[in-house]
Amino acid sequence: MPMSLKGRSLLTLKDFSSEEIRYLLQLSLDLKAKKRAGIRGDLLAGRNIVLLFDKPSTRTRCAFEVAVYDEGGQVTFLTNSQMGKKESLEDTAIVLGRFYDGIEYRGSGQQIVRDLAKFSGVPVWNGLTDDYHPTQLLADIMTLMENITKPLNQAKLAFVGDARNNVANSLLIGCAKLGLDFAAVAPQSLFPDEKLVEEMTEVCRETGGTILLTEDIGEGVLGADAIYTDVWVSMGEESQFAERIALLKKYQVNMDLIRQTKNPETIFLHCLPSFHDRNTEIGEMIYQQYGLAEMEVTDEVFRSRHSKVFDEAENRMHTIKAVMCATLAL
Ligand code: CP
Ligand code: NVA
């Protein structure tokens, strides 16, 4: 499928057509096979990439770094830059655009990635903002593709939890664009933004996808090929644990919820990191304060045969590689 995404930024999947998303997914699968075959690439040879992180990360940073090195490029990891403090975003973007062929940014405001793209003149990739996590969606769908035999447009994905966060928004967009049946299973106050739902309902008219918003777990997860959850409190929202626990406790992904899909082959997905035990500082703090040893998913589900979370984490690297190769080289 000949297609060029050269010079494009990935700020939100809204800017990408269904065909373009499919192309990136196929390229990701090809690059994964290439790596598995032990073939080193040079698609990014001579390219310099800067990774700007204003929020913490394990997977996204490492995925970008390994992907660049695999294809022969160079990376700079930048945190604590002058941007926004001593130097305007515009000036910083112009400087980075003079040094680098591509910029990854993780932080809060969606406007930051928009402005970086506008002023730098090079492709900018959104490594997570408060609104979206587009590279995550690609890994999520890639993992689903690896685990189902039916076409994507016959699959159903149910997101259970804080259905208005960055990961849920990107899933809603990606599922709509690819014609999946998407269910947001959450208390009404955490349903996705109405405007986004309206926009994606329009997209579904063309792709055949559907969008269901429901508070009812049984209805929402029925027939799902994938159950997806994310943390109840995203980065930057740490003051909201008490309120979110009260709202989302009954939406915890446990074996009973998995059984309610009535699909014995359903898979469990999570962008990670996840609170499925007490082996983290925050997990332990939540246990001490609220008596909850597991949050959005039980340890049983996390470690069950349904769980594909570590394949999904690996796929971050293949999909991010595809995005960089497609927008810089192919
Ligand atoms: N899923 C994800 O973005 O992980 P990190 O926060 O570790 O990058
Ligand atoms: N919704 C989460 C995703 C982390 C990868 C957050 O923003 O913290």
Image (tube, grey):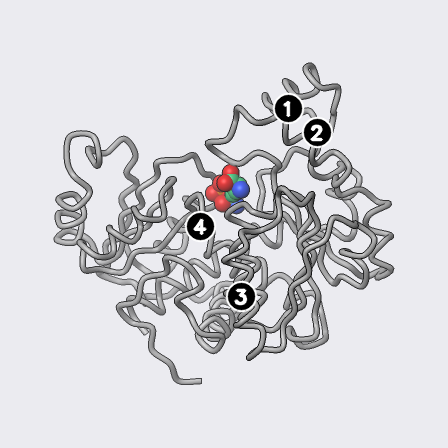
- Find out whether the residues at labels 3 and 4 contact each other: C-beta distance under 8 Å: no
Amino acid, disc 4:
Ala
Q: Residues within 10 Å of mark 2 (few under 14, many from 20)?
A: few
Q: Determine the secondary structure under disc 1.
A: helix
Nearer-N-terminus badge (3/4)? 4
Nearer-N-terminus badge (4/2)? 4
Q: Residues within 10 Å of mark 3 (few under 14, many from 20)?
A: many
Disc number placed over residue 200 in the picture, else none: 3
Give the CA distance from mark 4 to mark 1.
33 Å
Give the CA distance from mark 3 to mark 1.
31 Å
Amino acid, disc 1:
Ala
Where does the image place residue 55, in percent across and percent down from the top left?
40, 35
Q: Is residue 329 above or below residue 52?
A: below
Mark 1 CB near ligand 2 (8 Å cut): no
Amino acid, disc 3:
Met
Q: Residue at position x 82%, y 57% from top?
A: 261
Disc number placed over residue 63 in the picture, else none: 4
Where does the image place residue 229, in percent across and percent down from the top left?
66, 46
- Find out whether the residues at labels 3 and 1 contact each other: C-beta distance under 8 Å: no
Disc number placed over residue 246 in the picture, else none: 2
Q: Quadrant of the C terminus?
A: bottom left
Amino acid, disc 2:
Ala
Q: Residues within 10 Å of mark 4 (few under 14, many from 20)?
A: some
Give the CA distance from mark 2 to mark 3.
29 Å
Q: Who is closer to the viewer here, 91 or 22?
A: 91
Q: Residue at position x 58%, y 42% from top?
A: 272
Disc number placed over residue 242 in the picture, else none: 1
Q: Residue at position x 37%, y 40% from top?
A: 107
Mark 4 CB near ligand 1 (8 Å cut): yes
Q: Quadrant of the N terminus?
A: bottom left
Q: Who is closer to the viewer here, 193 or 328?
A: 193
